[in-house]
Image (spheres, rainbow, N blue to C red):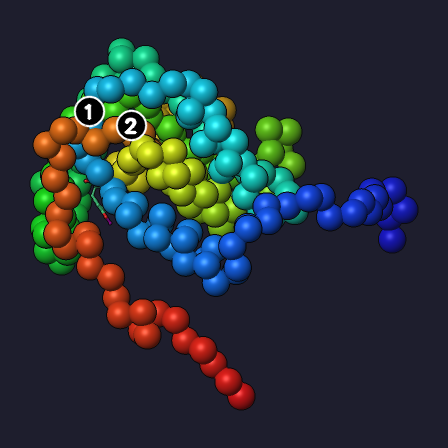
Amino acid sequence: MPTNREQPTWVPLPPRHQPTATPEQAAKQFYDVMRTRRTVREFSKQPVSKETIEWCVRAATTAPSGANKQPWRFVCVQDPELKKKIRAAAEQEEREFYERRASDRWLDDLSPLGTDEHKQFLEDAPWLIIVFKLAQGDDGSPVYYNTESVGLASGMLLAAIHHAGLVSVTHTPSPMKFLCEALNRPDNERPFLLIPVGYPADDCKVPKKALDRRPFEEVMIIDTA
Ligand code: IYR
């Protein structure tokens, strides 16, 4: 039995957000904010400050993670040259996906969303946030539940972007390995999501299909003994 394990230091629960409304009202108000979030694929070139992106990423970094290892990195790209390079590489993979790799069933499922191999948004959006998942620590140390952890942080990032009045798309060019080279990431990092962030184009449209929600009774189950 090792004797050198770090023991916890206990501190009182720090002050936390206290809604002035009742829990019911506060929960409903948050729902009313979140229900207007939409995935957007047509971006305006209107700039977004670095400070805005920083606060959004800070919000993401408050997520819980396995053994608090925080197995994530958020690479933020504003440089037009680098965005152009990422777009070219992503579109090459996407062409392969739409022309060969995707099954007929998959293309059927994507059809009402109107996606294709053209990824103009990778150049139009003022920022690209590329979320990387650590497969191990920088020193080779283990991480735990890294996929769940980075998924949680990414969800919080999307909520923060929406809360700031901005829009995003969770883009997943597959395979995403080109992002490791393009962004010079170390061997222990795996690309997880590519998230363009900005304002919607003036004439922005979204696919009607994406507004569908399953009946709530189907997804929330109150179980009893
Ligand atoms: N990665 C492709 C295809 C795609 C796949 C799924 I699953 C989507 O929900 C949307 C698109 C693309 O980005 O076009």
Compared with 127, 156 (above or below) is below
The residue indicated by pointer 2 is: 198
Q: From the Cβ of disc 1, is ligand 1 less than 8 Å away?
A: no
> SS of the residue at dot 2?
strand
How far from the left and from the top, in percent, is residue 222? 45, 78
28 relative position to 141: left or right:
left
Q: Residue 44 has which mark?
A: 1
Compared with 50, 159 (above or below) is below
Q: From the Cβ of disc 2, is ligand 1 less than 8 Å away?
A: no
Disc 2: CA contacts within 10 A as few (<14), some (14-19) or many (>=20): many
Asked where in the image residue 164 lies, by quadrant, the reply is top left
- In this view, the residue in front, 68 or 198, is 198
How far from the left and from the top, in percent, is residue 151? 44, 46
- In this view, the residue in front, 34 or 113, is 34
Amino acid residing under circle 2: Gly
46 relative position to 75: left or right:
left
- Whether the residues at callouts 1 and 2 have beta carbons within 8 Å, the answer is yes
| Residue under the image location 37 percent in, 28 percent down | 129
| Residue under the image location 52 percent in, 46 percent down | 149
Compared with 176, 16 (above or below) is below
How far from the left and from the top, in percent, is residue 71? 55, 38
Compared with 214, 64 (above or below) is above
> SS of the residue at dot 1?
loop
Question: Where ligand 1 lies, by image quadrant?
Answer: top left
Pick out the residue farthest to the front. Answer: 20
Q: Determine if residue 123 is in view.
A: no
Nearer-N-terminus badge (1/2): 1
Pick out the residue farthest to the bottom. Answer: 225
